[in-house]
Image (cartoon, grey):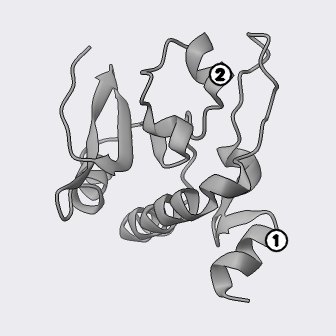
Amino acid sequence: KDFKAKCWEHGLLSPNFTRAEAASNTGGTSSCERNEPIPESLRAKAQFHAFKLERVRHALGDKPLRAVSWYRSPCHNAAVGGASASQHKEGWGTDWNSTGDAFDQAMEFHFSDGGRGYQGFVGGRIRHVDNGPARTWTY
């Protein structure tokens, strides 16, 4: 088996990001299943995203990063008013509390390559990054 398959089997998306931390977590605020894992059908997307985040983590000195939001089940996405085509539902969209310029620059660098993906602020200092098709949107 390849390295990514081994990571998945051991509860990881990548060496420093776990499947549990990426699970759809409603925080008990809706009727949705709590901590719903990323489905196997989205494994490739979620791992692609996680390995990009490994590069961001390395650029920031290999310190832990904790996402505010990663995978959202369709129920969870609807409960929070997420876009119908949200990349969170695809397992490769994440939201983060920005910690400043170095963090923002690392996210911008790693999530603006090749005309794919989006990175930007969705409210206050919450930064969204994903690997979906390049696009713009506003709130």
Amino acid carrying mark 1 in the image: Glu
Residue receiving disc 1:
9
Q: Nearer the viewer, residue 130 or 106?
A: 130
- State the image coordinates of residue 85 (x, y, percent, origin top left): 42, 30
- State the image coordinates of residue 90 (x, y, percent, origin top left): 52, 44
Residue 69's place in the image compared with 104, above or below, is: above
Specify the quadrant that holds the N terminus.
Answer: bottom right
Amino acid carrying mark 2 in the image: His
Specify the quadrant that holds the C terminus.
Answer: top left
**Which mark, residue 88?**
none
Place residue 8 in its image quadrant.
Answer: bottom right
- State the image coordinates of residue 95 (x, y, percent, origin top left): 46, 36
Residue receiving disc 2:
76
Q: Which of 13 and 108 is in front in this view?
A: 13
Q: Do the residues labelled 1 and 2 touch (CB within 8 Å)?
A: no
Q: How crowded is mark 1: few (under 14 residues within 10 Å), some or many (20 or more)?
A: few
Q: What element carries label 2?
A: helix
